[in-house]
Image: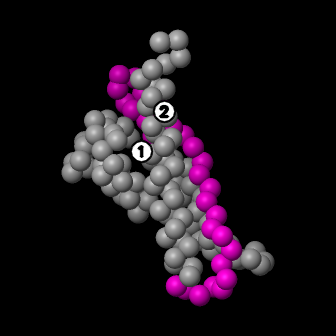
Amino acid sequence: MFADKLMRDLSLSHVFENAVPVGNTVFAAYEMSGHVEKFALEENGPPTHAVLDLEITVWQEKPLRTVLVRKHFHYQSAPLKSTDPMESAEKMSELSSRLSLDPRNELCVATQDNLHPAGD
C-alpha cells in the first residue's frame, strides 16, 4: 500500500521523470524496497497515538549497484482524544500521507549528491 502510494506520488510530481516515468509503473531507473515495522495504535497507557515505523531503501542497479537512500522513518500522531474508529482511521491516514513527502525529499537530496559528488 505504501509503496504504491509513494510510486504514484513520485510519478505525479514529475520530479523524477527519468526514474519513474508518468503513467509507466513497469520501468524505473531506481528500485525500492521497504519494511513496515509498525502501523498501529499505540495504547501503552494514555495518551493513545497512531504510529507508523518503517525502513525504506532506494537503489540503482546501473552502472554500479548503488544505494541512494536507506532510512528509517518514524511517525507518531498527536494524541487521540478517544479510540473512536473514525478518529483512529483519520490519524492513521495522516501518517501515511506524511510518508509520501519525506522519502521524496530524501531521494531528491540523494540523487543530487549522486549526480554531483563532492569535489566536482
Give yes or no for residue 2 being in the magenta stretch. no
Looking at the picture, which amino acid does disc 1 mark?
Met
Q: Earlier in the sequence, mark 2 or mark 1?
A: 1
Q: In the image, which residues are magenta?
A: 58-86
Residue 41 occupies quadrant: bottom right
Give yes or no for residue 65 being in the magenta stretch. yes
Q: Residue furthest top?
A: 119
Q: Residue at x 34, y 41 (%)?
A: 15
Label 2 residue SS:
helix
Nearer to the camera, 55 or 103: 103
Residue placed under numbered mark 1 in the picture: 32
The answer to whether residue 23 is visible is yes
Which color scheme is applied? one colour
Q: Residue at x 56, y 50 (%)?
A: 55
* Number of other residues with Cα within 10 Å of mark 1, as a class: few under 14, some 14 to 19, many 20 or more: some
Q: Position of residue 2 (x, y in %)?
A: 44, 59
Residue 87: assigned label: none
